[in-house]
Amino acid sequence: MRKVTGFVFAAGLGTRLMPLTADRPKAMVRCDGVPLIEQVVNRMVSAGIKHIVVNVHHFPDQIIDFLRTHRFGADILISDERAYLRDTAGGLRFALPLLKDCQQVLIHNVDILTTLSLEALLEEHLRSGADATLAVKQRETSRYFVFDQTTRMLVGWHDRRSGARRGDPEGPRDVERAFSGIHVVNRKMLEAIPTVEKSSITDFYLQNRHNFKIVGYEHDSDSWEDVGKCEEYRNRLS
């Protein structure tokens, strides 16, 4: 496998998990007795990823201390955003110097628990020659990526709640899929992210859908949970 680095988004304020995040970062909230950051890092290491970058902002020292005092079998570096949050695309661009000589980056939100095979996602990304491969599912949510059903290429975005649409006019064979918070991106594409203080990866994908090959990877048979919301977290515990 080509050189792959893992990147964990762990810098968020965790406002959807208040009051649990009043004294800790979201990454240190426990599910099944294990901090979320530990679960995600272990999954990456099990998939063969030995170099991982974690971004931090909210109660950053708790994450840093935890990672430094636990052995994961991987080289883990910190992208320190304690000065200000850079959002998703901005966070990736800021961390680029830490990604060393990797050719692909597997990105994982810290609050996502799933049985999705990271190995299978990586293999499909490499096989297809895509610049970015987005894990997606058929599930109920408010915002969806829109893909061409034949090519799996990203063509747009739809907010069903507000009715807002972005991208190309939808064709009869287009499908809407919910993003799973896990994706693989090649370094060439990451280097194209503008060096601004703050920017969104969703915006970047939509703006560059004609410049890069951005595809969806459906994993409908896998379990998937966003435990970054208080209601979902409590449901997980009940």
Image (tube, grey):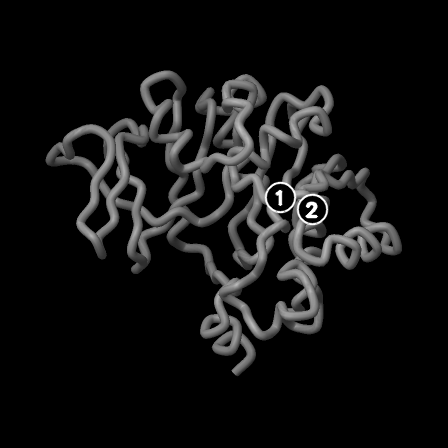
Residue 215, horizontal then vertical, whole percent: 38, 31
**Res 180 seen here:** yes
Please report contact status of discs 2 and 1: CB closer than 8 Å, yes or no: no
Which residue is nearer to you in this view: 103 or 56? 56
Q: Mark 1 is on which residue type?
A: Tyr
**Res 38 seen here:** no
Q: Please indicate whether residue 55 sits to the left or right of residue 141 in the image.
A: right
Circle 1 sits on which residue? 84
- How packed is label 2: few (under 14 Cα within 10 Å), some, or many (20 or more)? some
Residue 23, horizontal then vertical, whole percent: 69, 69
In the picture, residue 32 is in which quadrant?
A: bottom right
In the picture, residue 59 is in which quadrant?
A: bottom right
- How packed is label 1: few (under 14 Cα within 10 Å), some, or many (20 or more)? few
Q: Please indicate whether residue 117 sits to the left or right of residue 146 in the image.
A: right
Say which element carries label 1: loop
Circle 2 sits on which residue? 82
Which residue is nearer to you in this view: 9 or 112? 9
